[in-house]
Amino acid sequence: LTPPRMIAIAGGFLGVLIILRPGLTVFDPRSLLVLAAAVSFACSVVMVKILTRHDSPLTIIFYMAVIQMPMALIPALFNWVTPEWAHLPWLIVAGITGFSAHFTMAQALKIADASVIQPIDFLRLPLVALLGYVVYDEALDIWVLGGAAVIFCANYYVLRQESRR
């Protein structure tokens, strides 16, 4: 873990904190679910990185789907709502983009260190905020823009440093 990578990780995390503003907004217990998801995702990234030493990204994603399907099916049975035909294109898009995200992340982890990949992954938060603004007319406040700027700067810094190596 080189100093530029540590700076990029810290900068990306700082940008996320600026966007989320912990302590400056009313605490919502549901935010603990988001924290649990972040920890789970971090563990998943580490496991995928380990698995890419021996398995292809497609193999990893296949087994992830095989394991996740029954795990998701059990709680889904208690809350099942049959999708309407109008939702089918959106479900297909969600499946394709989800597969693409997992595949490209596994491929990236196969060829690069996680400490390089993760700061770039922090870009997901401002990109989702931008999509929310464009698609759902959600507000972009100064905190989102400031946090996004910090994340972009951290990524730019690490990419510049890595390109010099």
Image (cartoon, rainbow, N blue to C red):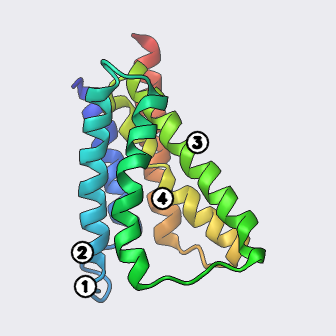
Q: Identify the residue under disc 2.
A: 32
Q: Nearer the viewer, residue 99 or 63?
A: 63
Q: Report the Cα–Cα distance between label 3 and label 1.
A: 31 Å
Q: Which circle's residue, 3 or 1, is located before the other in the chain?
A: 1
Tell me if residue 22 comes above or below residue 14 in the rendering: below
Q: Which mark is residue 163?
A: none
The three-letter amino acid code for the residue at tag 4 is Leu
Q: Which mark is residue 100?
A: 3
Residue 138 figure quarter: bottom right
Residue 104 image point, x, y percent = 52, 34
The three-letter amino acid code for the residue at tag 2 is Leu
x 53%, y 63%: residue:
145
Q: Report the Cα–Cα distance between label 2 and label 1.
A: 6 Å
Q: Identify the residue under disc 4.
A: 125
x 37%, y 22%: residue:
55
Q: Which mark is residue 29?
A: 1
